[in-house]
Image (spheres, grey):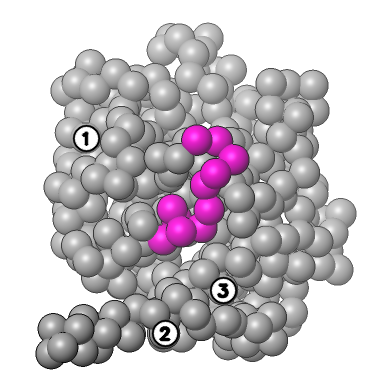
């Protein structure tokens, strides 16, 4: 009998948590008090190149969907396919990046009543207070930097505030999760690029990088880094997801792992059977390993993202509901949705400001 009572007492908190139902009003009230940031989408692919291979993905991202999903800020990436590492390839990549950045700015200008491009953490706070949505611009794949470190400041001046070092193919900067060890991690040029990113105030993003390159980038960077759209290898064993060693290193530097909403990165279940419970498994693992201060979200919408429960930006508040129903506090959710990422943005900005003195 005593064992039975002890078992019931042990299970009561879990049963209570599982039965908690959170209303729309509770979710929206929390979003009113916090800043929510999605650190990666590929909207620019379908918007700038509607006949391209990602054109069918168009529709997961829009300012209207951000408003409906109560998302305050999204990082819109200029995604660059990896090509040949030669003069012609680098010129093509630079032109493509510039075209996509111009396209993103045009999209924001066309929707000036709803959103604006932001260039700093203070801008994000100001735009949130105004009731508009914030667009921050990033680059996915620094292939467009070619072999010229001055490209970092060039793209910073165009408005880029974050850059993913690689994509799925080694460039001049580092090797990737696809070709682990091809270049021995971060190259000598890559080291200079990271230093220059630190100097100008551009966030270093290691999603897609090889395990060695990620660990080296963390060590090389003078500022905290992020993985803008990744998962946890211990939960879903694919090479794109981060090992515990990588997560520990990112956290030790003050960085953030942004959990993606890509079904194939997140769930071990057959397609169609996944749910936000699978997403929570990644969040829970990171929290247990390094604490709530190192968790964020990066959807990868319009570039492969989407799963049951969160198919597009209009459903982002479902993630909030899942976190609340799982028992996370409002303070913890505020950190995960934007507080942690804002901390990184501010640290990067402060370091760059100090270099200019």
Helix, strand or loop status at disc 3: helix
Please state which of residues 83 and 26 is positioned toward the viewer in this rendering: 26
Q: Which residue is mark 1?
A: 211
Please state which of residues 55 and 167 is positioned toward the viewer in this rendering: 55
**Residue sitting at x 17%, y 33%:** 212
| First along the sequence among labels 3 and 2 | 2
**Residue sitting at x 45%, y 76%:** 18
- Mark 3 vs mark 1: give the one in front: 3
Q: Which residues are magenta?
A: 270-280
Position of residue 307 relative to residue 297, above or below, is above
- Disc 3 versus disc 2: distance between alpha carbons? 16 Å
Task: Classify residue 153 as left or right of residue 7.
Answer: right
User: Is 313 covered by the magenta stretch?
Assistant: no
Q: Which residue is mark 2?
A: 16
Helix, strand or loop status at disc 1: helix
Q: Which residue is mark 3?
A: 321
- Mark 1 vs mark 2: give the one in front: 2
Q: Residues within 10 Å of mark 3 (few under 14, many from 20)?
A: many
Measured as percent of width and height from the top left, residue 176 is found at: 32, 27
Res 52 quadrant in image: top right
Please state which of residues 280 and 301 is positioned toward the viewer in this rendering: 280
Measured as percent of width and height from the top left, residue 291 is found at: 24, 70
Residue 240 seen by the camera: yes
Q: Quadrant of the N terminus?
A: bottom left
Q: Residues within 10 Å of mark 1 (few under 14, many from 20)?
A: many
Q: Residue furthest front?
A: 1
Residue 190 seen by the camera: no
């Amino acid at each position: 009998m005593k064992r039975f009572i002890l078992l019931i007492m042990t299970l009561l908190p879990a049963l209570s948590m599982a039965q908690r139902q959170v209303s729309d009003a509770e979710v929206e009230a929390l979003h009113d008090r916090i800043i929510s940031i999605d650190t990666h989408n590929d909207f620019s692919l379908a918007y700038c190149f509607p006949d391209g291979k990602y054109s069918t993905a168009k529709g997961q991202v829009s300012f209207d969907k951000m408003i409906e999903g109560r998302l305050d800020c999204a990082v819109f990436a200029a995604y660059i396919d990896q090509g040949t590492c030669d003069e012609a390839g680098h010129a093509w990549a630079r032109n493509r990046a510039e075209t996509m950045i111009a396209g993103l700015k045009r999209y924001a200008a066309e929707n000036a009543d709803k959103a604006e491009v932001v260039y700093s953490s203070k801008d994000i706070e100001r735009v949130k207070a105004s009731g508009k949505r914030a667009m921050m611009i990033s680059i996915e794949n620094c292939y467009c930097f070619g072999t010229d470190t001055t490209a970092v400041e060039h793209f910073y001046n165009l408005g880029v505030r974050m850059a993913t070092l690689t994509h799925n193919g080694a460039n001049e900067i580092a090797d990737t999760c696809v070709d682990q060890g091809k270049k021995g991690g971060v190259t000598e040029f890559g080291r200079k690029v990271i230093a220059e990113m630190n100097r100008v105030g551009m966030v270093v993003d290691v999603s897609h990088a090889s395990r060695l390159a990620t660990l080296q980038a963390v060590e090389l960077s003078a500022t905290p880094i992020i993985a803008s759209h990744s998962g946890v290898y211990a939960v879903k064993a694919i090479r794109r997801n981060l090992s515990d060693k990588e997560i520990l290193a990112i956290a030790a530097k003050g960085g953030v792992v942004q959990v993606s909403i890509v079904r194939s990165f997140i769930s071990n279940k057959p397609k169609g059977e996944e749910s936000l419970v699978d997403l929570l498994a990644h969040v829970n693992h990171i929290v247990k390993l390094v604490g709530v201060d190192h968790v964020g979200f990066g959807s990868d919408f319009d570039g492969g993202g989407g799963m049951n429960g969160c198919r597009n930006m209009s459903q982002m508040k479902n993630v909030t509901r899942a976190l609340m129903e799982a028992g996370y506090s409002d303070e913890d959710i505020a950190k995960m949705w934007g507080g942690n990422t804002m901390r990184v943005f501010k640290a990067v900005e402060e370091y760059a400001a100090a270099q200019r003195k």
